[in-house]
Image (cartoon, rainbow, N blue to C red):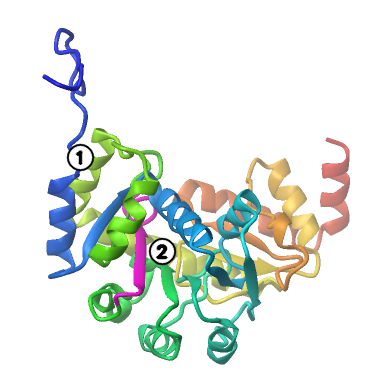
Amino acid sequence: MNLNENPFVEQRYYRYPDASYTEIRNLLREKYDLKSADVLLGNGSTEIISSIFLWAHLQKKKIVYPWPSYILYHELKQLYDADVTPIPMDIESWDVDTIISAVPENSLLILCNPNNPTGTFLKKGTAVEIISKLPTSTTILIDEAYIEYVDDDEINGMVNEVEKYTNLIVVRTFSKYYGLAGLRIGYALLSKEFYQCVRPFLQLWNVSLPAVEAAIDCLSSSPRYLHGKQIMIKSREHLRKTLCKNGFHVLPSETNFLCFTHPKIRYYVDYWEYKGLIVNKLTFYQNSQLHGYIRMSIEDDDVMESLYQTIYEIRGSYEKVSNIVNTV
């Protein structure tokens, strides 16, 4: 009788969620067999990353991350006017020595793995090598938003290392593999000490009850998620092969998207937009190695068939396509 809720309406969600989110946090502890580490829920993984970024900034930690990577990191740099040093990264591979040498004492290192927007993946053994060689004063945040799409032998990512390395935070989401992007729920696996540090940066009841219920359902043994992954991978590989056959340069990807370019990429993008196929032109990355690249998500069969049709229409007809687009 202390929260001023309204029980006098026929409304399922008139109660506030459990402020501690006990049930889903326990389920996640059980899923990953955590003994000492804790679980932090967020309004999408974005909220958690933002909170850790702010915490590090207020702790006067230097923040470093490979670049190009998830644009959120740069947006947070601008928002907080934080001390940030991007680490130039090859878009087709991870330069471990460069990363290690660029991380100073008392810093926050953010690794997006698999990386967005390139799709490249850093295997667990290599990630552990990086952590083991960094100063103990370094906090490592690994953003594993797309980890469920990688091969089964790497599917656990770094979650099993959280209890070994107390300076490690692993952030995941229900948005991608589980398809809950519209409900906004993510989580971090981290030490109890880090939980106490970061939780005050999040609002009370920051995750809605419908989002929690949907996420709990995702943690069941339903085969539809694995089935969806298999369909996506098959579609992604078909797209990759089609693009390569038609003169595109495609980056390796362990995600539900591909990043690629073409000598006449502008014609393709213009025609796709004319046909109602909106792709990510990676405009913000044009001063990086991703200049001229685009990112394309894997969609359902109808959308992909429309895409393939446009590729066949464009091939060998750049001038005709350019005239069509310019007259619209």
Quadrant of the snapshot with the C terminus: top right
Q: Is residue 260 left or right of residue 324?
A: left
In the picture, measured across the screen, residue 205 lies left or right of residue 123, that is left
Q: From what the image shows, is residue 67 above or below residue 221?
A: below
* Vertical side of 309 occupied by 214: above or below: above
Which quadrant of the view contains residue 173? Answer: bottom left
User: In the rendered structure, does residue 107 fall within the stretch colored magenta?
Assistant: no
Q: Is residue 34 visible?
A: yes
Task: Identify which residue is drawn at 80% across, 64% down.
Answer: 264
Residue 67 percent location from the top left of the image: 63, 71
Which residue is denoted by mark 1 in the rendering? Answer: 213
Rendered location of residue 38, percent (x, y): 22, 62
Q: Amino acid at mark 1?
A: Glu
- At mark 1, the secondary structure is helix
Q: Are marks 1 and 2 in contact (CB under 8 Å)?
A: no
Residue designated by label 2: 146
Question: Quarter of the image holding residue 149?
Answer: bottom left
Q: What's the CA distance linking mark 1 and mark 2? A: 21 Å
The segment highlighted magenta reads 166-179
Task: State the residue in front, 218 or 12.
Answer: 12
| Label 2: few (<14), some (14–19) or many (≥20) C-alpha neighbours in 10 Å | many
Q: Secondary structure at mark 2?
A: loop
Which residue appears at 56% of the width and 71% of the height? 65
Q: In the rendered structure, does residue 173 fall within the stretch colored magenta?
A: yes
